[in-house]
Amino acid sequence: MHQTISPYVLPLLESSFQLVALNLVCNEHNITEDELLGKGNYQNERAQKHVVDARVQYAYLLRKYTALGNPAIGSKFGKNAFYASFLLQSIKPKSETYKFARSLKDVDKRAKSYAEIQSKIPVKEKDTNTYVKDNIPCAMRVIRVICNYFDVTVDELRGRSRKEEFAWPRHICFYLLCSHNAVKQARAGRFFGGRDHATANHSIKTVRNEYETNKAFKQTLIAIKSKIGYKHPEQLA
């Protein structure tokens, strides 16, 4: 079951992937983080079936896409390695039910998309924010800088809102990831809330058109690319 991950991607996976996986599972099952992890008022309560299903899926994602072993996974729930083993062994029997199997497939697909984008990080430096190969910053640095520049969260960037304060940062992310970082449009679309390649293509065209017709936007994009660390921020890809 355990998938081999490049050692260069592990530092980011260990920190950010866990949060992404947690949010995916909580949203899928409409539960809170405390319910999923058995914290607070839910610490001593007997978990309902849908909560157990969520825990099984969270354990599955951590085991598949990170280097965490059973002791570390069990500790996420305030338990030990035996509890993690119990959750992971529950996958096969639970997958015999259509609802659970479909739900697991959906969260796995989204998690895989996120992990694949992170795996664009090929060279390790001291600061995990500055993975670079051939002067191309890593995908997660692109997303992080854009979030900081526009003061939005990753969840807002990946969300469904079409408000301008979220849509434009999202457009720019699509453009940079697909045009500069060679991330496939379909893959980028899946990462950004399950969108398709047509959405990514629309964003790329929107950014290029605005760059060529709006001087203020052109300067903004150049400034963002400079902060990210592209070698020639003034060039339009």
Image: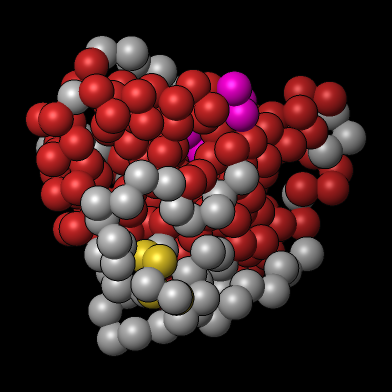
Q: Is residue 55 magenta?
A: no
Vertical side of 224 occupied by 126: above or below: below
- What residue is shown at x 55% (from left), y 64% (from top)? 119
- What residue is shown at x 66% (from left), y 43% (from top)? 108
- What residue is shown at x 10% (from left), y 30% (from top)? 216
SS majority, magenta: loop
Q: Is residue 188 or residue 61 the one in the foreground?
A: 188
The residue range painted magenta reads 191-198
Q: Is residue 91 or residue 25 the one in the foreground?
A: 25
Residue 115: where, in percent of width, then height? 56, 56
Q: Would you say residue 35 is visible in this rendering?
A: no
To which quarter of the image does residue 106 belong?
Answer: top right
Residue 223: where, in percent of width, then height? 14, 49
Vertical side of 128 occupied by 113: above or below: above
**Quadrant (top left, top right, bottom left, bottom right) of the N terminus:** bottom right
Residue 125: where, in percent of width, then height? 34, 85
For residue 137, side relative to residue 215 (left or right): right
Give the farthest residue toward the bottom.
126
**Colouring chosen for the image of the structure:** secondary structure
To which quarter of the image does residue 141 belong?
Answer: bottom left
Vertical side of 147 occupied by 144: above or below: below
For residue 144, side relative to residue 102 (left or right): left
Residue 32: where, in percent of width, then height? 38, 31
Q: Would you say residue 64 is visible in this rendering?
A: yes
Q: Is residue 45 or residue 10 the one in the foreground?
A: 10
Report the number of numbered marks.
Answer: 0
Q: Is residue 234 or residue 195 the one in the foreground?
A: 234
Q: Is residue 192 magenta?
A: yes
Vertical side of 190 occupied by 166: above or below: above
For residue 195, side relative to residue 26 (left or right): right
- What residue is shown at x 59% (from left), y 38% (from top)? 185
